[in-house]
Image (spheres, helix red, strand yellow):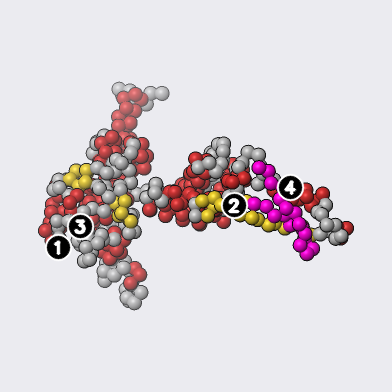
């Protein structure tokens, strides 16, 4: 029903009072709203009723609320919808780590730029402008980050349409991101780097690295391993643990057994012999039998070994009082993150001639395109071998019997 509003004078100003909907605790509630229209002109001081010019201002103020193609009950801001409806609904659908990333993107880049818009007012032009402003204001942002922001906006409006807050097409669909630098190439550990780490790392870091490098488990899946998941020749990925949250694995295909090569079996068997209670509980556990933090293992065991000074074994940030210059031990691998082991497994298997579909199964990806596009890296040796194959064909096609080039 179209609202007329109640226009009245208070002091030297005209006001309009009407009702509007807001989201509170995930529910739409109707509240009375009062907005100032403007100052009382001298010629209107003696009027008891608002003049036509003021009524026109009231109609203009109420126009968005009375929009014919939007229900007045859906008159909510983007900020209210995101915080009161979208995020609470996603808590049951998304992993805690994923939702934390969504919240960080919304809070850091999107909220200040578009949170004040009404859902119905935010269309493709506004989305295109916001993404452009983010790109121009943050020239260091990678193209992938802008894609993530656009995807989050698209997901928010898709949910608004699904819940009946909006009608029509998703307004983010035609919005594009501005020109931005491509992200750095992700890293994949070589077999030589993995073996070098296994020779010098202490426990439990050594066994963790072996599981990451030769079973291809994600960081949260390594932390989620319990002893009952290890059968002796395979590991069943049953859960993931992340910052106090325990979840199902990332996808249905992620919840699958992973075969183990003999060296990893031996490392786990030896580690089990030294474990205080190897029948149940986390494989990598603290003294209190809780799951060990991989960040703590990285900072306390891995980085001190990989980045140690060649003369005193100290880390760069501990080297200030030493009289000699910090010089990293030559030949030790550099740290590129836990996920680099997973990419390394895909790359090393591919280099051995293993079919991409088989690598997909080992990494438990939902589809082979993810494996091919994001995990398998071309090694220098592969590039050289490919060029040698091309060279042999060139020899046959272009060279004559006497060695002269034929064009």
Label 4, label 3: how far apart the Cα atoms are: 66 Å
**Residue at the (31%, 25%) spot, across then down:** 396
* Label ID, residue 281: 3
Q: Is residue 368 above or below residue 319?
A: above
Q: In which quadrant of the rendered image does the C terminus lie?
A: top left
Magenta region includes residue 9: yes
Q: In which quadrant of the rendered image does the N terminus lie?
A: top right
Q: Kindly indicate whether the residue at mark 2 contacts the one at mark 1 (C-beta within 8 angstroms).
A: no
Name the chief secondary structure element in magenta: strand
* Pointer 2 or 3: first along the chain: 2
**Residue at the (19%, 61%) spot, across then down:** 203
Residue numbers of the magenta segment: 1-19
**Residue at the (32%, 75%) spot, across then down:** 322
Q: Is residue 11 above or below residue 106?
A: below
Q: Position of residue 351 (x, y in %)?
A: 26, 39
The answer to whether residue 8 shows anywhere in this view is yes
Q: Kindly indicate whether the residue at mark 3 contacts the one at mark 4 (C-beta within 8 angstroms).
A: no
| Residue designated by label 4 | 59
Q: Secondary structure at mark 3?
A: loop
| Residue designated by label 2 | 30
Of marks 4 and 3, the one in the foreground: 4
């Amino acid at each position: 029903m179209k609202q007329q509003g109640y226009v009245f004078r208070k002091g030297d100003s005209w006001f309009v009072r009407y009702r509007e909907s807001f989201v509170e605790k995930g529910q739409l509630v109707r509240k009375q709203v009062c907005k100032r229209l403007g100052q009382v002109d001298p010629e209107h001081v003696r009027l008891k009723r608002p003049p036509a010019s003021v009524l026109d201002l009231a109609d203009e103020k109420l126009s968005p609320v009375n929009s014919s193609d939007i229900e007045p009950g859906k008159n909510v801001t983007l900020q209210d919808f995101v915080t009161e409806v979208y995020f609470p609904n996603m808590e049951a659908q998304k992993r805690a780590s994923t939702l934390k990333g969504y919240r960080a993107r919304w809070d850091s880049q999107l909220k200040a730029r578009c949170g004040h818009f009404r859902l119905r007012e935010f269309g493709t032009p506004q989305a295109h402008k916001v993404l452009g402003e983010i790109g121009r204001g943050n020239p260091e942002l990678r193209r992938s980050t802008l894609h993530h922001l656009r995807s989050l906006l698209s997901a928010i409006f898709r949910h608004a349409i699904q819940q009946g807050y909006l009608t029509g097409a998703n307004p983010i669909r035609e919005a594009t991101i501005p020109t931005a630098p491509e992200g750095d190439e992700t890293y994949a550990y070589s077999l030589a780097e993995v073996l070098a780490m296994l020779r010098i790392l202490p426990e439990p870091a050594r066994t963790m690295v072996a599981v990451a490098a030769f079973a291809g488990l994600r960081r949260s899946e390594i932390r989620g391993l319990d002893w009952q998941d290890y059968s002796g020749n395979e590991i069943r990925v049953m859960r993931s643990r992340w910052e106090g949250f325990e979840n199902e694995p990332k996808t249905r295909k992620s919840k699958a057994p992973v075969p183990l090569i003999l060296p990893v079996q031996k490392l786990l068997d030896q580690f089990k012999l030294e474990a205080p209670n190897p029948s149940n509980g986390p494989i990598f556990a603290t003294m209190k039998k809780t799951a060990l933090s991989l960040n703590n293992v990285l900072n306390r065991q891995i980085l001190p070994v990989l980045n140690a000074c060649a003369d005193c074994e100290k880390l760069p940030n501990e080297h200030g009082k030493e009289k000699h210059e910090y010089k990293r031990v030559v030949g030790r691998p550099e740290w590129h993150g836990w996920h680099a082991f997973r990419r390394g497994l895909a790359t090393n298997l591919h280099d051995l001639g293993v079919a991409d579909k088989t690598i997909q199964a080992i990494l438990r990806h939902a589809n082979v395109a993810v494996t091919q596009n994001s995990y398998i890296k071309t090694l220098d040796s592969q590039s050289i071998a490919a060029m040698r194959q091309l060279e042999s064909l060139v020899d046959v096609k272009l060279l004559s019997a006497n060695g002269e080039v034929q064009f």
